[in-house]
Amino acid sequence: MPPVSTQAIVLHSFKYSESSKIVRLLTRDLGVQSAVAKGALRPKSKFGATLQLLSEGVAQIYVKANRELHTLAEFDVSRQRGDLARDIRRYAAATALAELIMRTAPAEANPLVYDHLVSALDRLEAVTDEQIDAEALSVLWQVVGVLGFTPSLDGCARDGRQLPAGAAKFSVADGGFLCATCAATGSGPTLQPEDRAALERLLVDERESRPTLSQRHAAAHRRLLARFVRRHLAEEHELKALSFWEALPWNDM
């Protein structure tokens, strides 16, 4: 049976035996898949350096029915995204994004998730240093939405009541903002009008709408997003790359 050819991005790889690797790939046609790259660690391997984290290309995969581990026949790399490694903030956001998709995206095909990851990585490479914090928050929130967990911003997350303008309590447990009645028994931070507006703008796929965030406000938004992801997508499991991105002391950069 011939291999399946599909666009793919390397989400993770690790050593398997003395000469091989297992790679986790987000593919456009098969979803998230694991495959053995036989001989990838040999000096003259046909894979060479193509299986680096976030490398993008065309994968040839021998798919085994009813198996979770397949065989990677070829990986023709088209982009390795070296610009993401030019500073720690870009790389931390990109690896958090890859980890989020690897750990929470469904195995079945979802081209929208693939296209969003490509777009997100493009944006992280191209954004200015001044806007990297806001862009990283934006691409992560938008992928959360593509995975089906967009927070409730306009209506109360409990009773659907329309929310007035101004400060509002954001309940991670309930999945969004609460009206005044529900907020009385809900937990979570109260976002002041400017922070609430910033969150709303971060979820919009328009670069011109990005808010300008101070280091303190960016850190608060990272904590909120990380808590939301752990509660609704990761089922409270630890995501190491996400935790690194959340906690890195950006003011020391």
Image (spheres, helix red, strand yellow):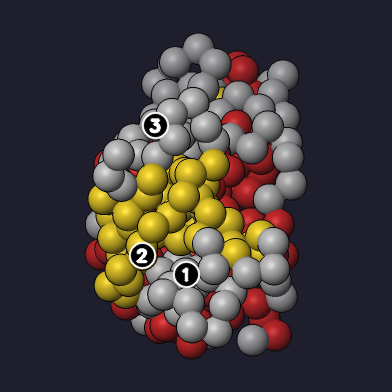
Q: Residue at x 68, y 32 (%)?
A: 235
Give the Cα distance between marks 3 and 1: 22 Å
Q: Where residue 75 is drawn, which disc sits there?
A: 2
Residue contact between numbered discs 1 and 2, judged by CB atoms under 8 Å: yes
Disc 2 residue type (three-letter) = Phe
Mark 2 and mark 3: Cα distance apart in space:
20 Å
- Left or right: 186 with respect to 133? right
Q: Position of residue 213 (x, y in %)?
A: 50, 68
- Tell me the crowding category of disc 3: few under 14, some 14 to 19, or many 20 or more residues within 10 angstroms, Cα based: few
Residue at the farthest front position = 1
Q: Is residue 244 left or right of residue 124?
A: right
Q: Position of residue 143 (x, y in %)?
A: 41, 46
Above or below, 13 against 3 in this view is below
Of the numbered discs in the image, which one, if any, rests on residue 32? none
The residue type indicated by label 1 comes to Leu
Residue wearing tag 3: 108
Residue at point 30%, 39% (across, down): 1
Closer to the N terminus: mark 2 or mark 3? Answer: 2
Question: Along the polypeptide, which appears first: circle 3 or circle 1?
Answer: 1
Residue furthest top in the image = 159
Please state which of residues 85 and 174 is positioned toward the viewer in this rendering. Answer: 85
- The residue under the point 52% across, 47% down is 34
Mark 1 sits on what residue? 51
Q: Specify the quadrant of the image occupied by residue 60.
A: bottom left
Q: Is residue 245 above or below residue 128?
A: above
Badge 2: how crowded within 10 Å, few (<14), some, or many (20+)? many
Q: Secondary structure at mark 3?
A: loop
Name which of mark 1 and mark 2 comes first in the sequence.
Answer: 1
What is the spatial separation of the Cα atoms under label 1 and label 2, in whole angstroms?
8 Å
